[in-house]
Amino acid sequence: MEDKKVIFSGIQPTGTFTLGNYIGAVRNWKPLQDEYNCIYCVVNMHAITVRQEPAKLRKNTLDAYALLMACGIDPEKSILFIQSHVKTHAELSWVLSCATQFGELSRMTQFKDKSKRHPDDINAGLFTYPVLMASDILAYNADLVPVGVDQKQHLELARNIAQRFNQRYGELFKIPDAYIPEVGAKVMSLQEPTKKMSKSDENPNACILILDDKDTIIRKFKRAVTDSESEICYREGKDGINNLMTIYSSVTGKNFDEITSEFAGKGYGDFKIAVGEAVADHLAPIREKFAEYSADKEYLKKCYTEGAEKALAYSQRIVSKAYRKVGFVDIK
Ligand code: TYM
């Protein structure tokens, strides 16, 4: 690979992606491919921190891989792979867990939230999840990590772990920076716009899935919660409208002033339909490409096999150095 900066990011295979995953992260991955060495991963090992049905996880993992390709991630340009195919992630994770404090992990808000949601399964993997995430990033010495704002705390921990390791054992890891979009870093629920849009929301109208059909998308936007005013402008306190404006801006490229002028004198009803249509039109080609890629199992297999080989070769160099630095005996 040429001497460009390295990008790493990952996404969990939870069925289809949400519009939040797409706007906050995945859509930004595509343009980065021309400027950087990009490494993208379906993080199925992270997914088992909450209970999964094995057959469903297998299908969701392959679907997520095909969906990333449908979103424009090109396995010829980027290294695109499935996490469990590349053993270095788990290997480094053990080493880094010994450089991570219990207290640090206890402060992770996602751990606290997920433990509340799954009180019957607060497993050790859920607790050490951020260490595996740090390993994903550090195994490739990534410079930049494009994520939504909800991953910022995990990324800060990865930076701290890298610094601590370097201090203890000598320079090895680069300290990665988050790459968070200015607009759309936190897409909110359509039903409770003070909460992040998430697939785990019980109300199906709260969340747009990127494979939803046009009618479903428009129906969900029509039901979006707004406020009792009538002005379409971005202002504190107008959480529902701010969210719709953010989404509309992300898929049309228009800024907030342009959106306000476009809808001057129009009502929320018209605006919601316009947002729904713009989103559905934007996502339509992704649905088509997804159908194509997911049907071609042989091609998918070729891509993820080659992706895993490249990812292993790349990360092995860095993880072997980490092994040597901590004092593990070489076998060769
Ligand atoms: P995950 O699978 O929950 O989400 C994937 C990406 O989508 C972003 N995102 C959002 N952005 C804006 N608005 C939202 N409502 C929204 N919901 C999700 C997330 O910030 C993320 O960028 N732990 C990670 C996956 C991971 C990872 C990594 C990421 C594992 N290893 C290494 C970067 C680098 C996660 O669960 O993301």
Image (spheres, helix red, strand yellow):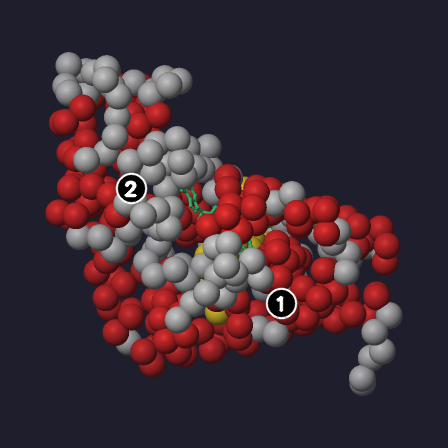
In the image, residue 22 above or below residue 194: below
Query: 238 and 36: which one is in front?
Result: 238
Q: Residue 154: percent from the left, percent from the top?
A: 60, 47
The answer to whether 98 is drawn above or below residue 25 in the figure is below
Q: Position of residue 326 (x, y in %)?
A: 84, 66
For label 1, the SS is helix
Cα–Cα span, label 2 and label 1: 34 Å
Which is more N-terminal, label 1 or label 2? Answer: 1
Location of the N terminus by quadrant is bottom right
Res. 317 in view:
yes
Q: Residue at x 46, y 32 (%)?
A: 182
Amino acid, disc 2: Ala
Question: Residue 89, labelled with which disc?
Answer: 1
Q: Residues within 10 Å of mark 1 (few under 14, many from 20)?
A: many
Q: Secondary structure at mark 2?
A: helix
Identify the mark at residue 8; answer none if there is no mark.
Answer: none
Rendered-image quadrant of the C terminus: bottom right
On screen, residue 57 above or below 210: below
Kindly identify the amino acid type of the residue bearing the numbered disc 1. His
Image mark for residue 206: 2
Does any atom of ligand 1 lie closer than 8 Å to the CB of label 1? no
Q: Position of residue 274 (x, y in %)?
A: 17, 33
Q: Is residue 145 left or right of residue 65?
A: right
Of badges 2 and 1, the one in the foreground is: 2
Residue displayed at 42% across by 43% down: 24
